[in-house]
Image (tube, rainbow, N blue to C red):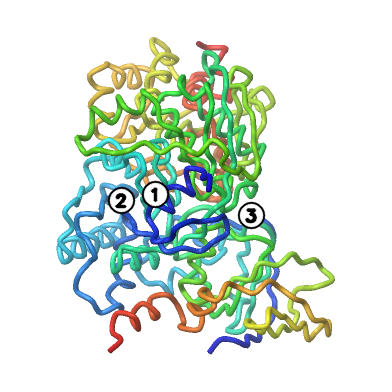
């Protein structure tokens, strides 16, 4: 049998001798990530099981990130509930609320490694596929099943092969590529599929950029997004973990349901228009639309690469006085690095607001909730109605470069004009 | 046993996402009954007032796309929705439906098959929907046996409980 990466990793975690797409199998989970869902829903569900243990307190990564520090009494209560649960079941990796957003902190701490099977109580758990492992989101009840047994059922997915060649041009980011891909696939085009990223083009995409891509594969409906390993990954992991791992490559004659080819040098800046992440047009078509807020942050685009390009665009400039620019790093480590490099000063001098790491505005939680009819350009992953605040607010998704350029002009701007 | 389900259709469109079903600002509400009052608040402000204990949602493509928030299934359960028929489901949403014991039926449909308020009778183990209003039989692909078993056990946690405490 020849296998794709998804087939291989699922097979390795099951007790089957072979697998085929469409087959339902039970798999052993290597790691589970949980956030506020724990206090929101999982706790109550888990208590119904009537057991006083979790299968392995060492394989649970628990973090608070969505509403931190708590902006409301109900969020604070949710956090209290989370802490009670984590203490009761003696979680070993109880991260707290001062490290940042789950999908950044977990990899930073070396928890996502090649060959692993990771699930999480968040749809953007697909992010860890940048590290040559399989990872996907599940709901609270599935989390309870994993907590109790360490196992979960999976349907073996068909895979799409995405061949990348060439290099992104100046001012174009991996966000532009993934938005373009979602636009081409549509938001339902990859439901249940595993997207496997191949080709020479991968070597020039940073780990930060790969995480942006795997983060958003779920916006096309995908179950997994996974990159082949390379020296960049080796270097990244060397700096963060001593645990040994084995790279997973697909077999040469593995079977792919569809194949797509992209030349990264042909990608141009795009935006996702309201209110669907698949509503993709070239930035030129929307240029000039006035914005009230520009948001740079989230698990999609709050990393050093993102902050650096924004700082390059904003250095020595002022944002439009009628626009707010909110910048939130994806983790506290990134916060410190940005501080060291002098980026935070650049943002503040440009008129931006720099905050501590949280999901915050991306989910309309706090630190930048949109008012009625406001227009926002955001580096996050979803522009659904009401996602960032008032249901009449309009959200455009774009790359950090486009967000920063637009903040300067107070209207949607092609970043190539200001770089 | 939930093998036979009877109810009235409520029609929704394509790409109904989890933020549509439970807006983020309702997610931190501790009381799930209160949370359920926000179901489809922006998209269909009258939904909560209109939905009754015997409704079957009939939706388009990619139903439940977006977040993993299981609340987006649970609010329908609280409101008494008995089943959801959709042209396609988002992956996590489908799992959440079955896990909470609500049948998710994938079926390509058009106005000839269902209109708003039609009286349906669904026989899960036969893969058959009888539209009483239109006097029409509609076949669908049955769920795999192990998923049907989860529905019969009224959700995966009940099933797991049985396994954990047997004997």
Count neighbours of disc 2 (C-alpha within 10 A) and say few if under 14, some if 14 to 19, many if 20 or more: few
Does A290 sit above or below residue A111?
above
Of A394 and A275, the residue lying toward us: A275
Does A183 sit above or below residue A149?
above
What is the x, y in percent for residue A180?
62, 32
Instruction: Please give the residue where the numbered disc 1 appears in the rendered image.
Output: A365
Residues under labels 2 and 3: Cα distance? 30 Å
Q: Quadrant of residue A28?
A: bottom left
Whether residue B152 sits left or right of residue A248 in the image: it is: right
Residues under labels 2 and 1: Cα distance? 8 Å
Q: Where residue B15 is drawn, which disc sits there? A: 3
Chain of the residue that carries numbered disc 3 in the rendered image: B
Instruction: Please give the residue where the numbered disc 2 appears in the rendered image.
Output: A71
**Is there any visible trace of residue B31 in the rendered image?**
yes
CB-based contact (under 8 Å), mark 2 and mark 1? yes
Of A152 and B129, the residue lying toward us: A152
Secondary element under disc 2, as helix, strand or loop, is loop
């Amino acid at each position: 049998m020849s296998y794709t990466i998804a087939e291989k990793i699922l097979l390795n975690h099951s007790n089957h001798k072979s697998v085929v797409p469409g087959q339902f199998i039970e798999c052993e989970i290597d790691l589970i990530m949980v956030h506020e869902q724990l206090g929101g829903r999982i706790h109550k569900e888990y208590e119904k099981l009537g057991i006083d243990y979790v299968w392995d307190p060492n394989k649970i990564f628990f973090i608070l990130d969505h509403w931190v520090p708590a902006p409301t009494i109900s969020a604070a209560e949710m956090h209290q509930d989370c802490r009670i649960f984590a203490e009761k079941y003696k979680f070993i990796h109880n991260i707290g609320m001062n490290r940042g957003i789950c999908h950044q902190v977990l990899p930073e701490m070396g928890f996502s490694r090649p060959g692993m099977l990771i699930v999480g109580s968040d749809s953007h758990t697909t992010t860890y596929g940048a590290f040559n492992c399989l990872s996907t989101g599940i709901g609270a009840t599935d989390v309870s099943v994993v907590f109790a047994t360490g196992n979960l059922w999976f349907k073996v997915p068909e895979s799409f092969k995405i061949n990348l060649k060439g290099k992104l041009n100046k001012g174009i980011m991996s966000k532009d590529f993934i938005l373009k891909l979602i636009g081409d696939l549509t938001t339902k085009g990859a439901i249940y599929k595993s997207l496997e990223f191949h080709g020479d083009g991968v070597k020039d995409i940073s780990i930060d950029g790969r995480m942006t891509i795997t983060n958003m594969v779920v916006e096309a409906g995908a179950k997994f997004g996974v990159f082949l390993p390379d020296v960049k990954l080796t270097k990244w992991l060397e700096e963060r973990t001593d645990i040994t791992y084995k790279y997973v490559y697909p077999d040469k004659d593995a079977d792919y349901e569809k194949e797509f080819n992209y030349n990264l040098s042909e990608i141009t800046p795009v935006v996702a228009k309201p209110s669907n992440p698949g509503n993709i047009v070239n930035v030129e078509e929307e240029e000039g639309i006035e914005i009230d807020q520009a948001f740079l942050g989230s698990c999609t685009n709050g990393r050093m690469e993102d902050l650096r390009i924004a700082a390059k665009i904003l250095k020595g400039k002022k944002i439009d006085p009628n626009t707010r620019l909110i910048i939130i790093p994806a983790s506290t480590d990134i916060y410190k690095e940005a501080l060291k490099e002098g980026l935070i000063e650049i943002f503040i001098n440009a008129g931006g607001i720099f905050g501590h790491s949280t999901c915050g505005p991306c989910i309309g939680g706090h630190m930048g909730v949109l008012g009625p009819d406001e227009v926002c350009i955001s580096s996050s992953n979803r522009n659904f109605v009401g996602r960032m605040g008032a249901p009449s607010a309009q959200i455009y998704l774009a790359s950090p470069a486009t967000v920063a350029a637009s903040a300067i002009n107070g209207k949607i701007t092609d970043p190539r004009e200001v770089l | 046993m939930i093998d036979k389900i009877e109810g009235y259709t409520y029609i929704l469109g394509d790409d109904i996402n989890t933020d549509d079903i439970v807006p983020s600002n309702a997610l931190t509400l501790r009381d799930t009954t209160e949370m359920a009052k926000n179901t489809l608040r922006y998209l269909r402000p009258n939904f909560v007032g209109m939905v009754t204990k015997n409704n079957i949602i009939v939706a388009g493509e990619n139903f439940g796309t977006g977040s993993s928030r299981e609340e987006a299934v649970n609010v329908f359960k609280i409101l008494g929705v008995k089943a959801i028929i959709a042209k396609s489901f988002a992956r996590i949403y489908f799992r959440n439906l079955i896990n909470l014991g609500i049948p998710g039926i994938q079926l390509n449909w058009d106005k000839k098959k269902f209109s708003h308020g039609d009286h349906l009778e669904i026989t899960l183990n036969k893969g058959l929907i009888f539209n009483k209003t239109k006097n029409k039989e509609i076949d669908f692909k049955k769920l795999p046996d192990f998923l049907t078993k989860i529905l019969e056990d009224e959700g995966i946690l009940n099933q797991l409980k049985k396994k954990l405490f047997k004997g």
